[in-house]
Image (cartoon, rainbow, N blue to C red):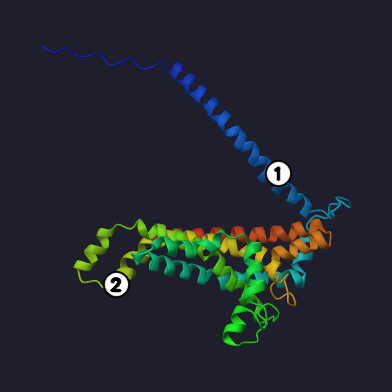
């Protein structure tokens, strides 16, 4: 004859609530340092920037008069602001496509190479580790100089890569692709290595060739990674500043000046911090709209598939 073992008595509701409350208090103690930094260095600057965009404050902090949406109205009527915004959109369009496609191509190449993979990874990812000043100086002094530059000297050309308004933007895009493609390459390579190998074996047994396996297995499995890379690349290209400022200064004839550089110029050269803040928040609104549109588009595609 077996005897039933009594189940342990459940904790009283009051005791359980007390334990939960204690855990909540301890959790808040861990959150407070991060929350304080977040509020001080992100939320407060955003609030302060909005306030400044609604005023006529200058770089010295004087002439701080409330002008409402006057700065925004002036910005929408400013042809130089529209020109800089157009340059930013052109740079984004020209750089995003090759950075995504070339990153994928390099990742596929390295993934299938079976010798000295570490060397290929270092070669493709190495430039991404260089500071923007080093990259800009390298291309400015060694690749693009007329006459003795690497491109003109090798192919016998006489092109003003950074001095011709019709070529300067393409030159900056080429530099940016060489510099930053390693990041997308690394994301794609990690995603390729996570695809189960048995899928390729099963497809090969069914007679699928290399292109069929790429189209039917690899690209669909890389869908989420591609969505992430496209969103990150769009955001990075819309915020371009460093290499253009160092290589061309926005010239020649404002043909490469992005909107962030325009905001910098009117804020720190023209001393109009309020107007510069308004221009910055116009770009911020565009970035938010593009991000939400991209995320919604990729989410819809994922649901349909």
Of badges 1 and 2, the one in the foreground is 2
Question: Crowding at label 1, few (<14), some or many (≥20) Cα neighbours within 10 Å?
Answer: few
Whole-angstrom CA distance, mark 1 to mark 2, is 54 Å
Q: Is residue 58 left or right of residue 233?
A: right
Is residue 264 or residue 178 the one in the foreground?
178
Q: Which mark is residue 195?
A: none
Decide: is 61 above or below 37.
below
| Residue 148, quarter of picture | bottom right
First in sequence: mark 1 or mark 2? 1
Count of numbered circles in the view = 2
Q: Secondary structure at mark 2?
A: helix
Instruction: Determine the residue positioned at 78% across, 58% down.
Output: 69
| Residue 264, quarter of picture | bottom right
Is residue 64 or residue 261 the one in the foreground?
261
Quadrant of image for the N terminus? top left
Question: Crowding at label 2, few (<14), some or many (≥20) Cα neighbours within 10 Å?
Answer: few
Decide: is 247 above or below 15.
below
Q: Is residue 226 left or right of residue 57?
A: left
What percent of the width, then of the height, locates residue 81?
74, 68
- Give the residue pinned by disc 1: 44
Decide: is 151 above or below 68.
below
Instruction: Determine the residue positioned at 88% across, 51% down.
Output: 62
- The answer to whether one can see residue 284 in this image is yes
Q: Secondary structure at mark 1?
A: helix
Quadrant of image for the C terminus? bottom left
What percent of the width, then of the height, locates residue 37?
65, 39
- Give the residue pinned by disc 2: 210
Outermost residue on the right side: it is: 63
Residues under numbered marks 1 and 2 in contact, where contact means CB atoms less than 8 Å apart: no
């Amino acid at each position: 004859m077996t005897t039933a073992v009594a189940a342990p008595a459940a904790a009283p509701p009051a005791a359980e609530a007390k334990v939960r409350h204690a855990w909540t208090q301890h959790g808040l103690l861990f959150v407070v340092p991060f929350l304080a930094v977040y509020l001080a260095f992100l939320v407060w600057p955003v609030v302060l920037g909005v306030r400044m965009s609604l005023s006529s404050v200058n770089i010295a902090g004087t002439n701080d008069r409330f002008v409402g949406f006057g700065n925004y109205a002036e910005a929408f009527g400013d042809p130089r602001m529209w020109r800089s915004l157009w340059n930013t959109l052109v740079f984004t369009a020209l750089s995003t496509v090759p950075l995504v496609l070339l990153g994928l191509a390099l990742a596929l190449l390295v993934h299938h190479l079976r010798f000295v993979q570490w060397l290929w990874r270092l070669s493709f990812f190495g430039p991404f580790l260089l500071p923007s000043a080093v990259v800009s100086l390298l291309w400015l002094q060694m690749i693009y100089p007329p006459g003795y530059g690497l491109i003109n000297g090798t192919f016998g050309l006489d092109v003003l890569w950074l001095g011709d308004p019709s070529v300067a933007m393409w030159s900056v895009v080429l530099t940016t692709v060489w510099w930053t493609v390693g990041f997308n390459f690394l994301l794609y390579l990690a995603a390729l290595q996570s695809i189960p190998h048995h899928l390729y074996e099963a497809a090969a047994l069914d007679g699928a060739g290399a292109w069929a396996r790429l189209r039917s297995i690899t690209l669909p499995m890389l869908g989420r990674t591609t969505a992430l890379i496209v969103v990150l690349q769009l955001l990075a290209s819309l915020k371009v500043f460093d290499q253009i400022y160092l290589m061309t200064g926005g010239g020649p004839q404002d043909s490469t000046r992005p909107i962030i550089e325009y905001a910098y110029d009117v804020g720190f050269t023209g001393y109009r911090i309020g107007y510069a803040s308004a221009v910055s928040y116009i770009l911020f609104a565009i970035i938010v709209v593009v991000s939400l549109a991209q995320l919604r588009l990729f989410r819809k595609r994922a649901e349909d598939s």
